[in-house]
């Protein structure tokens, strides 16, 4: 550890609540898919702030939009009409079958809004006392108390109980188990089409269509958490669109404003009737600054066809990773993913491989101790992806 890094680490120890275990890196600057640490070392960033900087760090156009909006209007609260929200809503709604948007500030908050809307729609519009939310094993929906309840992972809720009631979980991929779990008090099924924190696990399109059919048959809502997989990352604008399904509500956040805190839900016109003036609100949600920047981000995603680029680059990345798997038997267990949301599950302990990648200048995430999770900017040069796989190949060869 360098002296500069150690100094920052010690300062943090004194000043911050201890809630994160950090990588041994202090980042001071970013541009595109490159980051620089406090010692001036350059890295290829294959994580993009956990699928946030989809357009790359300090994207020139986004920086300009931020500066222009920053001089015009930051925040007045939702007591006022603001054109920025409407421009963003119109763009987002042009990408899906939904009819209404609600803005907030993070992924967990977007899921809270989705859950609240589903419950209130059932109660107030449908007159049914249906409140239960069914989620899937290995899901992740965020860290607020209700999102934790939906996530249902004891290691994350340890020490924080009691969690809100009205959540239950079934094994992902098992339609019969889901059908059994749906009862008169069920309001909605909540799922990620590609489970991100679960280790980059795409649900099969057949299963997703089966879930949708069950929701329709049982007359309950389908909510897709697109917080990580949405906004072009998987090769379609929304991950659910791969399966051709039409969820009633979707939640989003991470890449929405390329790094400004921003979340949203989109809902069908019918289900949006569940909210009335005063039923749900946030001070910051959809503020002019975040909305103005998000609007530019979505505009760029659409204009530059970045979902399509993610599909093409991701397909070639996975092909090359599979070639590596074939060339070096016993090193890679599985290559998974959709678009530029890729998991490379190693057959060995992943920690030393991940550390060596970092030493050689490649930043990615290690999930569950053995899966290299790649969430690069959608604008990354293909040469950076190729260099990553060459380096991974070198490391795996040396480790054999
Ligand atoms: C990151 C994430 C969340 C939580 O988002 P926050 O902004 O951290 O609250 C929720 N769902 C999914 C699928 C995520 O990847």
Image (cartoon, rainbow, N blue to C red):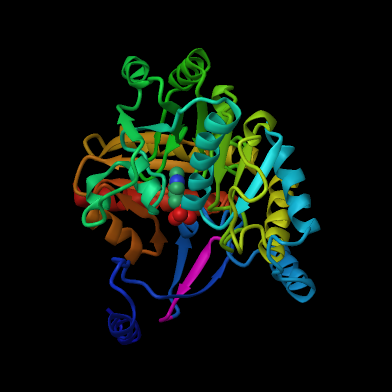
Q: Exactly how many numbered labels are in the figure?
A: 0
Let me know if residue 313 appears in the view.
no
| 370 with respect to 210 (left or right) | left
User: Quick check: 75 above or below 243?
Assistant: below
Residue 64 in magenta stretch: no
**Residue 101 x %, y %:** 67, 43
- In the displayed structure, 387 sits above or below 337; it is below
Q: Position of residue 218 (x, y in %)?
A: 47, 15
Q: Identify which residue, 37 or 191, lies in the foreground.
A: 191
Which residue appears at 28% of the width and 72% of the height? 18
Measuring 55% from the left and 53% from the top, which residue is drawn there? Answer: 377
Q: For the magenta stretch, what is the residue range?
A: 33-39
Q: Quadrant of residue 21?
A: bottom left
117 to 108, vertically: above or below: above
**With respect to residue 347, does 56 lie above or below?**
below
Q: Is 36 one of the magenta-colored residues?
A: yes
Can residue 208 be seen from the camera position used here?
yes
Q: Residue 9 versus residue 79: which sits nearer the camera?
A: 79
Percent position (x, y) of residue 103?
A: 63, 52
Q: Position of residue 186 (x, y in %)?
A: 42, 26
**Residue at 71% over, 39% down:** 93
Asked whether, in this view, residue 375 is left or right of residue 54, the answer is: left
């Amino acid at each position: 550890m360098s002296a500069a890094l150690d100094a920052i680490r010690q300062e943090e120890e004194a000043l911050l609540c201890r809630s994160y275990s950090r990588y041994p890196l202090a980042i001071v600057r970013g541009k595109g898919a490159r980051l620089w640490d406090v010692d001036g070392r350059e890295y290829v960033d294959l994580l993009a702030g956990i699928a946030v900087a989809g357009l790359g760090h300090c994207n020139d156009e986004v920086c300009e939009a931020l500066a222009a909006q920053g001089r015009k209007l930051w925040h007045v609260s939702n007591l006022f009409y603001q054109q920025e929200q409407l421009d963003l809503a119109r763009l987002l709604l042009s990408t899906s079958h939904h009819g209404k948007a609600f803005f907030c500030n993070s992924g967990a908050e977007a899921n809270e809004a989705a859950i609240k809307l589903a419950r209130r729609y059932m109660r107030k519009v449908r007159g049914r006392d249906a409140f239960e939310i069914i989620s899937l094993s290995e899901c992740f929906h965020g860290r607020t108390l209700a999102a934790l309840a939906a996530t249902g992972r004891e290691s994350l809720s340890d020490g924080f109980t009691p969690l809100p009631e009205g959540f239950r979980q079934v094994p992902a991929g098992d339609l019969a188990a889901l059908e059994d779990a749906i009862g008169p008090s069920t309001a909605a099924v909540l799922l990620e089409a590609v489970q991100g924190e679960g280790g980059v696990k795409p649900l099969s399109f057949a299963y997703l269509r089966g879930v949708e059919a069950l929701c329709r048959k049982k007359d309950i809502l389908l909510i897709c958490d697109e917080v990580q997989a949405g906004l072009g990352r998987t090769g379609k604008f929304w991950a659910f669109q791969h399966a051709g399904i039409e969820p009633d509500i979707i939640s989003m956040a991470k890449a929405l404003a390329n790094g400004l805190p921003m979340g949203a839900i989109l809902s069908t016109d019918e289900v949006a009737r569940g909210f009335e003036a005063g039923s749900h609100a946030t001070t910051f949600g959809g503020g002019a600054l975040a909305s103005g920047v998000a609007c530019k981000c979505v505009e760029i995603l659409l204009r530059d066809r970045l979902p399509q680029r993610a599909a093409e680059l991701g397909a070639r990345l996975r092909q090359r990773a599979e070639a590596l798997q074939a060339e070096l038997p016993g090193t890679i267990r599985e290559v998974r993913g959709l678009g530029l949301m890729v998991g490379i599950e190693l057959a060995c302990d992943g920690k030393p491989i991940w550390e060596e990648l970092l030493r050689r200048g490649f930043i990615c995430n290690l999930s569950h101790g053995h899966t290299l999770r790649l969430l690069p900017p959608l604008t990354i040069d293909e040469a950076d992806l190729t260099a990553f796989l060459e380096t991974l190949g070198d490391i795996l060869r040396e480790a054999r």
